[in-house]
Structures are given as structure tokens and as C-alpha cells.
Image (cartoon, grey):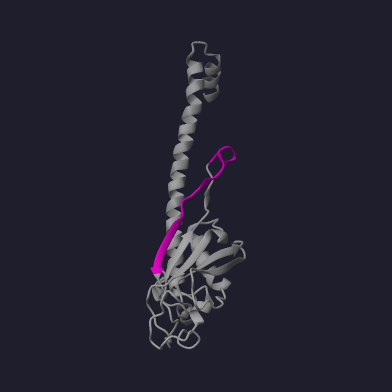
């Protein structure tokens, strides 16, 4: 049946075949455009969920910059015991993923001017926990597309005996993510907007995972 249709179509000399020949490519492009539009919106949704999940994991596990988590501002930093850790000594730390999906790594750097710019000692294991969680929501995500930023929230105090002296705002961000349309060989890839989600630090020393091996949403509220 399909064969007979195309045979009649090719032999049609009434002009209808020419009209179909002009309209059909446009119809195909429109159809593909609709598909790519839906795929693009789905990718945006996945990026949003990935940042939310990554931030939630980062908030209840060990800080990626271990030097920030372990630094005692009342001893090494010379601040009065119990005083607020201000932005002059801790403003912001940005940690950027490196490596591959099979072996993610991370680099951390200070942003702005801090008087106590001590070694940050980034933890690849802590970053790996965040990245692995995000990759579940966005398969194919690369570590180099993930940033985790720790910003001073004004919470915490120098010499805190129960945990880190600071309780920063954590922002998990996706940067440089590319979307590949169906005909990517023709149209190339499209850059996606930056996606990010922020949440306040809850643990910072990984106690949730240490206390509950094989942690889940019930005992660590990972969401």
C-alpha cells in the first residue's frame, strides 16, 4: 500500500507532487523543532533537579574544602572565642569539578579578599558524593560542569566545639552544559543557561554518613 502511494506520488504530473515536495521538508523541520523544544525543556528540568539534589547532599555531608571545615578561627585565626566569623576572614570559596565521570576531582579557590587565606585542602571524595547524586538526575553530566560555592552566611562562631566555625550558604551550580539537538551535526550544540540552587549548611563534617552507613532519605533527610 505504501509502495503504491509513493509510486503514484512520483508519477503525479498535476502539480500536487511539486507542492508536496515543497511542504514536506518544512513539515519535517517543524516536527523536529517541536521534538527538540520538548527535549530542551526536559533538559532544563533535569538540570534544576540535579542542582537541588546536589545542594541537599552537600548540606548534610562533609565540606568539600576540608581546610575551611577544620580551621579554628579562635585559635589559628586569633578571633575572640564565640565571635561571629566575618567576611573579612571568610567571604566565599568556589570549588570546581575536574577529571572525568569515572574519576572526578575538584579544585577550590578563595573569592574576594580574606585575611586568613589558609590552605583549603579540597576533598575529591566529598565532591564525588555531590557529583554522583547529581549524575543520577542528569546522566552524562561531567564533573567540569559542576561548581559548589560556599558563601559566608554570618552564622556559626569562632571556636565552635561541636563542628566547623562557619555555617555557610552552599550553592550548587551547573555551568557550560551543552544541549545537542537531533541534527547536532548540522546545527551544532546549544549552550544551556546556568542552573543553580542554594541551601544552608546543616552538617559540614559528614556526621550523617558516618553515623548512618548506607544513608538514605529516612535517616539523613537527603530528599
Q: Is residue 134 above or below residue 204?
A: above
Q: Is residue 160 above or below residue 47?
A: below
Residue 82 lies left or right of residue 135; in this view the side is: left
Quadrant housing the C terminus: bottom left
Residue 169 percent location from the top left of the image: 41, 70
Residue furthest top as drawn: 14
Residue 151 lies left or right of residue 95; in this view the side is: left
The answer to which of 117 and 179 lies nearer the viewer is 117
Residue visible at 39% across and 83% down? 157
Residue 47 percent location from the top left of the image: 46, 56
Picture quadrant of residue 160: bottom left
Q: Which residues are magenta?
A: 182-199
The answer to which of 19 and 149 lies nearer the viewer is 149
Residue 180 percent location from the top left of the image: 54, 45
Q: Is residue 196 magenta?
A: yes
Q: Is residue 157 above or below residue 105?
A: below
Residue 147 percent location from the top left of the image: 51, 63
Label count reads 0
Q: Is residue 70 magenta?
A: no
The answer to which of 181 and 75 lies nearer the viewer is 75
Amino acid at each position: 500500500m505504501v509502495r503504491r502511494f509513493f509510486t503514484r506520488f512520483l508519477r503525479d504530473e498535476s502539480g500536487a507532487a511539486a507542492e508536496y515536495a515543497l511542504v514536506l521538508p518544512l513539515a519535517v523541520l517543524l516536527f523536529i523543532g517541536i521534538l527538540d523544544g520538548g527535549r530542551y525543556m526536559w533538559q532544563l528540568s533535569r538540570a534544576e533537579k540535579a542542582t537541588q539534589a546536589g545542594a541537599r547532599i552537600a548540606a548534610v555531608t562533609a565540606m568539600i574544602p576540608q581546610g575551611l571545615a577544620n580551621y579554628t578561627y579562635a585559635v589559628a585565626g586569633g578571633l575572640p572565642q564565640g565571635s561571629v566569623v566575618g567576611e573579612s576572614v571568610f567571604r566565599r570559596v568556589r570549588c570546581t569539578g575536574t577529571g572525568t565521570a569515572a574519576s572526578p576531582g575538584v579544585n577550590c579557590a578563595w573569592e574576594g579578599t580574606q585575611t586568613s587565606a589558609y590552605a583549603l585542602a579540597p576533598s575529591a571524595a566529598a565532591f564525588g558524593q555531590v557529583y554522583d547524586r547529581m549524575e543520577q538526575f542528569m546522566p552524562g553530566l561531567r564533573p567540569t560542569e559542576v561548581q559548589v560555592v560556599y558563601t559566608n552566611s554570618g552564622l556559626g562562631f569562632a571556636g565552635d566545639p561541636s563542628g566547623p566555625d562557619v555555617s555557610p550558604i552552599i550553592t550548587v551550580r551547573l555551568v557550560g552544559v551543552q544541549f545537542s539537538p537531533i541534527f547536532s551535526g548540522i546545527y551544532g550544540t546549544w549552550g544551556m543557561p546556568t542552573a543553580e540552587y542554594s541551601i544552608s549548611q546543616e552538617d559540614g563534617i559528614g556526621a550523617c554518613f558516618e553515623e548512618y552507613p548506607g544513608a538514605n532519605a529516612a535517616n539523613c533527610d537527603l530528599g
